[in-house]
Image: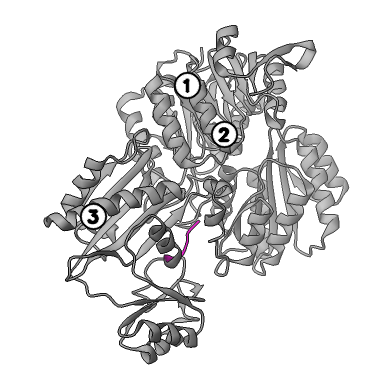
Amino acid sequence: MDIHEYQAKELFRGAGIPVPPGEIATTPDEAEEIAGRYGGMVVVKAQVHTGGRGKAGGVKLAKDAAEARAHAEAILGMDIKGLTVEKVLVTPGEDIATEAYVGVLMDRKKQAATFMVSPEGGVDIEAVAEENPEAIRKLTVDPRYGLLPHQAYWLANFLYEDKALARQATKIIGQLYEAFQANGCSMAEINPLITTPDGELKAIDAKVSIDDSELFRLPDVEAMRDTSDEPAAEIKAREAGLSYVKLDGDVGCCVNGAGLAMATMDLVKYYGGEPANFLDIGGSSNPDKVVSALEIITADPSVKSILFNIFGGITRCDDVANGLVEATSRIDIDLPIVIRLTGTNEEEALQILEDNGFSAYSSMDDVVEKAVELAKA
Amino acid sequence: MAIFIDSDTKLVVQGITGRDGSFHTTEMMEYGTQVVAGVTPGKGGQTFEGPDGASVPIFNTMDEAVAETGANTSVIYVPPAFAAGAVMEAADSGVDLVVAITEGIPVLDMARAHAFARDQGVRVLGPNCPGMISPGKSKVGILPAQIVEEGPVGVVSRSGTLTYEAVFALTNLGLGQTTCVGIGGDPLIGTNFIDCLEAFEADPDTEAIVMIGEIGGTDEQEAAAYVEEHVSKPVVGFIAGQTAPPGRQMGHAGAIISGSAGTAEEKMKAFEDHGIAVAKRPVDIAGLIQERLA
């Protein structure tokens, strides 16, 4: 789960990291009022779940409250990479002497949290890694011991020659690791970590992703979920316990298992079609899940045919067939549905489906080809 | 022969009294797996009633279970909040292999559990995996037994049902398997492709290998390089997720293209560059294996 910059900053503040104040505005009036209270220069920053806000014009410096209002007017409602801006963060402008990057993420290969720091902050760290890899220092944290003090100091010393700054940075790096652990993060970054002309360090931008598997035990973090820029279908799917990702095509896909679901989408493409979605109904043959899946797929106006691909393993195909029959009797569907079931109790399942007027297949290729053909008809 | 599990596997089921644990214990026993013990804290002294009147003693701790029964392998059907703890308890108990089926274990928990298990020299499979089956010998996990057959093909995959698809197609062509291993769809997994390739290469009964990957991470690319260097047996590969958009998690926690890294194209190219035959469709996997065994 991605959280907004202002929420990430709350987590960082909670860990003791120096973060400038900031408040959220949802209207130009609010933005003006907040800017007026801060006085002087402020930054108005779009809060959306994507990077590249600055390039898209979603981050603007304002010299006073009136200008903050004008910027908020322009930014609120703006479209950034398909997401509508509903909120802006208004935060005092800072005098910046230097900008550094400090980030920590779960490294799949090392199977441990790994820090990356660079004195070249305020830019895309992946670009730095590519063009100037020696400007990055990395450190993998042993999960058995956590981040050790000398390791944090070693990272900080790469950023600052000044002793006082390195000391401050050591503390911030330690606090970032604590925030990362305490909030179940898969990624947490400060970019940039600035120094002010007075020699103070401040985290002026923050980005955090949370491991979804942590949320059951972190209710305060779960409460940060903002679904306003999430498609309604994906919210509904999550609540129904389904994995769903909307795509651009017209063949609605309903599959059991994530790998098979991806392979089914690929096969739709192979046969000249375009998948409308990724949807994994999991291992269950529960009719309620099938109903939810069908409701989600049919709510997408671009869907022209519906394809079920079920591999019965532990799940019995006849159970799934009965679930499907029940589900389709509970909701009205005008679109053609083609179904492929194979594996355990396949013959019984195909019989049930045929008795109820469905086109049933046992080959994955045949059913995908048919679904593509129906979508084009 | 087979890899990792065979007829000498003596299994303890952690979470044996839960809904999934009890169901799959019965399935495993029906297949012929030697299930020698179960563990559920607080239910020690009870017994699990399996098929055909067989009963399995339940212990409070892994330590007791292993001491009393000589179990050498454990399988975990424990809820996500406690599963990483169960992996570490198993790794501490004297078993050689821990198979973690549970989906949704916090990644930070697994980072600790993997580090702990490595220290103990214990192999972990998973988590978020279907387990494995050595046809005719033993099944540990949830793979459907009726789709497998004994034979010369080793199968390793990150997926569940997609593996079943490939295995079923092999079986239908008369190509049985030595062992089918589902390594799991999580970002941090224990046993990886390379571990399985190494074991299949060393297994005299395995004559060809199927490797099924998906988007996300770089394990497939590294495995491909390993194949060219160290594997003499023919390998057929498949990658799921050619149509997956970047930045979106496709079901499995580990199935996500980050930036431009971890795409299906990149992985398929790595396979081809290192001499692995790439199946364009799942149905082609079995055919490519057949050609190579002819």
| Residue B150 position (above or below residue A292) | above
Q: Give residue B222's position: percent from left, percent from top.
A: 34, 36
Element under disc 1: helix
Q: Give residue A282's position: percent from left, percent from top.
A: 66, 44
Residue numbers of the magenta segment: A1-5
- For this rendering, which residue is in front, B179 or A288? A288
The chain to which mark 3 is attached is: A
**Neighbour tally class for label 1: few under 14, some 14-19, many 20 plus, Cα within 10 Å:** many
**Neighbour tally class for label 2: few under 14, some 14-19, many 20 plus, Cα within 10 Å:** some
Along the horizontal axis of the image, is A366 left or right of A274? right
Amino acid type at circle 3 is Ala
- For this rendering, which residue is in front, B136 or B38? B38
Is the residue under label 1 in contact with that under label 2 (CB below 8 Å)? Answer: no
The residue that disc 2 covers is: B82
- Numbered circle sitting on residue A169: 3
Q: Give residue B211's position: percent from left, percent from top.
A: 47, 33
Amino acid type at circle 2 is Phe
Q: Please state which of the two labelled residues, at mark 1 or mark 3, is closer to the viewer.
A: 3
Name the quadrant containing residue A70. bottom left
| Residue A205 position (above or below residue A222) | below
Residue at 34% x, 65% y is: A19
Q: Is the magenta stretch mostly helix, strand or loop?
A: loop
Q: Distance between the residues labelled 1 and 3?
A: 38 Å
Name of the residue lying farthest toward the left:
A161
The residue that disc 1 covers is: B91
- For this rendering, which residue is in front, A236 or A347? A236
Residue A3 part of the magenta-drawn span:
yes
